[in-house]
Image (cartoon, rainbow, N blue to C red):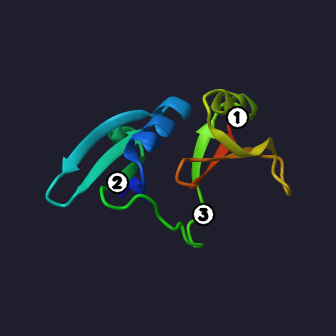
Amino acid sequence: MRILHTMIRVGDLDRSLAFYTDVLGMRLLRRKEYPEGRFTLAFVGPGEESEGAVLELTHNWDTPSYDLGNAFGHIALDVDNAYTACEQIKARGGKVTREAGPMKHGTTVIAFVEDPDGYKIELIQNRVP
């Protein structure tokens, strides 16, 4: 058993795709429109779906925004260097909500960014063995 994807609902698919591909550097893996259901599914990730979990961006055509609620936490991404990643994300127009630095009660270097719909994304810096 393995995790295939995590689905999040987005209000503006083009804006979200631009963030995940242009700002975070993921690739659009597949996209399919369902006119009868008035929704589109787009799958993005750093690599092929056969290699690991990806994100499913679900856009319901008649819903421009969502209330994120208080149960969802965040999406976590592994990065080589959180400091560099934050600078690149800001240069590409992304929003960094917590600059890179050690965790409050630990040594792992993390940062947080926010996507256009308000979803939090944690950047976790690789640890060199």
* SS assignment at label 3: loop
How many labels sit on residues? Answer: 3
Q: How would you rate the neighbour count of disc 3 (Cα within 10 Å): few for under 14, some for 14-19, many for 20 or more?
A: few
Could you tell me if the residues under marks 2 and 3 are in contact, i.e. CB atoms within 8 Å?
A: no
Q: Please give left or right for residue 117 compared with residue 11 in the image.
A: right
Q: Earlier in the sequence, mark 2 or mark 3?
A: 2
Name the residue tied to disc 3: 73
* SS assignment at label 2: strand
Q: How would you rate the neighbour count of disc 1 (Cα within 10 Å): few for under 14, some for 14-19, many for 20 or more?
A: many
Across and down, in percent, residue 86 comes to 70, 34
Residue 77, image quadrant:
top right
Of all residues, the one furthest to the bottom in this rendering is 70
Residue 86 vertical position relative to residue 122 in the rendered view, above or below? above
Across and down, in percent, residue 37 comes to 19, 61
The disc labelled 3 sits on which kind of residue?
Gly
The disc labelled 1 sits on which kind of residue?
Cys
The disc labelled 2 sits on which kind of residue?
His
80 and 40: which is toward the camera: 40
Could you tell me if the residues under marks 1 and 2 are in contact, i.e. CB atoms within 8 Å?
A: no
Name the residue tied to disc 1: 86
Which label sits in the foreground, 2 or 3? Answer: 2
Q: How would you rate the neighbour count of disc 2 (Cα within 10 Å): few for under 14, some for 14-19, many for 20 or more?
A: many
Q: The N terminus is located in which quarter?
A: bottom left
Between marks 1 and 2, how big is the CA–CA gap?
27 Å
Name the residue tied to disc 2: 59
Q: The C terminus is located in which quarter?
A: top right
Of all residues, the one furthest to the left in this rendering is 36
- Which residue is at a point 27% across and 41% down the rendered structure image? 31
